[in-house]
Image: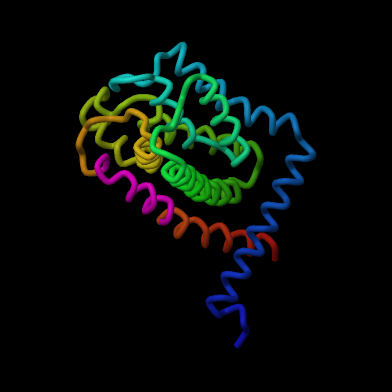
C-alpha cells in the first residue's frame, strides 16, 4: 500500500501543495507589483468611503470608526493588507481596548476566515477556468461582504434580511472581533450574535473542510 494513503502522508502532501501555491502567489506579486498595491489600497478606500461619505455604522451607538474597522478587517486579501488596514484604522482613531491577548485572538479569527475564503477562491477560480470568468465570479462573491454586518448593524435592516445577515460567516467574524477588540457592535441579542466567537471558528472550519479537499482534488486532476 502506498504511503500517500495514510493520514500523515496525505497531510504532508496537502501542506506541500499549499506551499507550492503560496510560492507561486509570491512570485506573481513580484511580477505585478501594481496589482499588489491596488489590492492594498482598495480596502483603505472602502473604509474611508463608508466612514466619511456613506456614514457607515448605521444602527449602532458609538463611534463609527470603531464599528467599521473590525468589520473591514474581515474583508482583507492578505496578511499584508491586514497590517495596512490596521495602521490606517489606528490613524483614523480606532483602538482596541481589551488587551494584547484578546487582540491576538481577534487577529487569529481574521486569519482563519481569510484562510477559508482563500480555498473558496481557489476552487471557484479553477471551476471558472478562463480569466474573464474568474472576474465574473469575483463580482458574484461581492454580495457576501455587503450582506453582512460589516458596514451596518442588522437591527437597522428589515427583519428577514437582518436575520440572514447575522448568520453570514463574515458577520460572525466581524461580531467576534469587535467583542475581542472591545469595539461597539449590534445589540440584537440573537443566538448568532451571542455565540459569535463560536460561529467565527465553526464557519471557517466547515468551509475549509468542504473547499480544501475540492480544490486539492481539482488541482490534482488539472496537473495530470
Dividing the picture into quadrants, the one containing residue 175 is: top left
Magenta region includes residue 189:
no
Residue beneath the point at 48% across and 37% down:
141
Q: Is residue 108 above or below residue 148?
A: below
Relative side of 222 to 200, left or right: right
Residue beneath the point at 54% across and 38% down:
137
Dividing the picture into quadrants, the one containing residue 17 is: bottom right
Question: Can residue 140 be seen?
Answer: no
Magenta region includes residue 198:
yes
Q: Main secondary structure of the magenta part?
A: helix
Residue 50: percent from the left, percent from the top? 45, 18
- Nearer to me, 22 or 61: 61
Quarter of the image containing the C terminus? bottom right
Looking at the rendered structure, the number of numbered marks drawn on it comes to 0
Question: Can residue 9 be seen?
Answer: yes
Q: What residue span does the magenta drawing correspond to? A: 192-205
Residue beneath the point at 31% across and 30% down:
185
Amino acid at each position: 500500500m502506498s504511503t500517500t494513503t495514510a493520514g500523515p502522508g496525505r497531510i504532508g502532501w496537502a501542506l506541500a501543495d499549499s506551499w507550492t501555491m503560496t510560492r507561486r502567489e509570491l512570485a506573481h506579486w513580484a511580477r505585478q507589483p501594481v496589482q499588489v498595491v491596488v489590492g492594498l489600497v482598495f480596502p483603505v478606500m472602502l473604509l474611508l468611503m463608508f466612514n466619511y461619505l456613506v456614514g457607515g455604522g448605521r444602527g449602532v451607538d458609538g463611534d463609527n470608526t470603531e464599528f467599521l474597522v473590525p468589520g473591514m478587517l474581515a474583508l482583507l486579501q492578505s496578511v499584508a493588507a491586514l497590517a495596512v488596514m490596521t495602521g490606517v484604522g489606528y490613524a483614523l482613531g480606532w483602538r482596541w481596548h481589551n488587551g494584547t491577548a484578546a487582540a491576538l485572538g481577534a487577529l487569529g479569527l481574521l486569519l482563519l476566515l481569510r484562510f477559508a475564503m482563500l480555498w473558496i477562491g481557489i476552487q471557484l477560480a479553477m471551476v471558472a477556468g478562463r480569466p474573464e470568468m474568474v472576474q465574473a465570479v469575483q463580482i458574484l462573491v461581492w454580495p457576501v461582504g455587503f450582506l453582512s454586518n460589516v458596514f451596518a448593524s442588522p437591527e437597522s435592516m428589515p427583519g428577514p434580511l437582518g436575520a440572514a445577515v447575522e448568520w453570514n460567516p463574515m458577520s460572525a467574524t466581524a461580531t467576534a472581533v469587535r467583542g475581542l477588540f472591545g469595539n461597539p457592535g449590534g445589540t440584537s441579542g440573537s443566538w448568532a450574535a451571542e455565540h459569535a466567537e463560536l460561529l467565527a471558528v465553526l464557519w471557517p472550519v466547515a468551509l475549509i473542510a468542504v473547499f480544501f479537499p475540492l480544490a486539492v482534488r481539482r488541482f490534482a486532476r488539472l496537473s495530470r
